[in-house]
Amino acid sequence: NAGVTQTPKFQVLKTGQSMTLQCAQDMNHEYMSWYRQDPGMGLRLIHYSVGAGITDQGEVPNGYNVSRSTTEDFPLRLLSAAPSQTSVYFCASSYPGTGELFFGEGSRLTVL
Amino acid sequence: AQRVTQPEKLLSVFKGAPVELKCNYSYSGSPELFWYVQYSRQRLQLLLRHISRESIKGFTADLNKGETSFHLKKPFAQEEDSAMYYCALERGAQKLVFGQGTRLTINP
């Protein structure tokens, strides 16, 4: 049981480049979400999904896209990277009603 | 607006001393509150939730609706408690609002 798997762990981009952060979970969780972690700001919700085919915006969605074609996968796309998107990104999954999120190891992104 | 505030970025105590990590929240309804912990080189994980009223690793947290607080406490700190601690509020559909985090260091 791998839990929540994120790739890549590290990435450096130039301003304007696009990329996709991958997230997969093998726990059959309905809910999945993406957070970014910045110093002094805690974790902030970017996008979330309550099931395959259903996504919605969180607190800081601008510059990011998501899709949920399967229960297992929830990729996060950066459309045109900006230095303000330099951050550590966490994917999480959970069963509804529990409040317990299972997190991936994080992906550290640097945009130059 | 829902908000979680952890006033201390850093907290340092000696082994065996009591620990209290502060958390205040603003929420208009009945809050669901959690403490998450991230140990060095480990994933962020749930420590405890207010609704279960349990003690995990010697930590407890009591919801005080009058003071809108959910402070995390442990009577005797241990070195393995050193970690980053986040207080979080659920605003429906498993969407969490996190505080800024407190880095706890336990000195030997």
Image (cartoon, coloured by chain):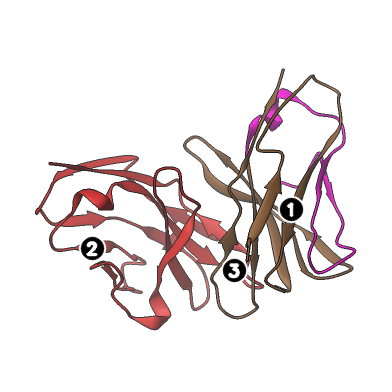
Chain colours: A brown, B red
Judging by the rendered image, the residue that carries numbered circle 3 is B91
Indicate the secondary structure of the residue bearing disc 3: loop
B80 sits to left or right of A50: left
Residue A74 is covered by the magenta coloring: yes
The chain to which mark 1 is attached is: A
Q: Are marks 3 and 2 on the same chain?
A: yes
The chain to which mark 3 is attached is: B
Q: Nearest the camera: A103 or A42?
A: A103
Q: Nearest the camera: A92 or B102?
A: A92
The magenta stretch spans which residues?
A: A59-88
- The tag on residue A23 is 1
Judging by the rendered image, the residue that carries numbered circle 2 is B73
State the residue at coordinates (87%, 57%).
A67
Q: Nearest the camera: A97 or A72?
A: A72
In the rendered image, residue A50, in percent from the top left (x then y), is placed at: 76, 71
Amino acid type shown at disc 3? Arg
User: Is residue B1 visible in the rendered structure shown here?
Assistant: no
Between the residue at mark 3 and the residue at mark 2, the CA separation in whole angstroms equals 24 Å
The quadrant holding residue B61 is bottom left
Neighbor class of circle 1 (other Cα within 10 Å; few <14, some 14-19, many 20+) is: many
Q: Are marks 1 and 2 on the same chain?
A: no
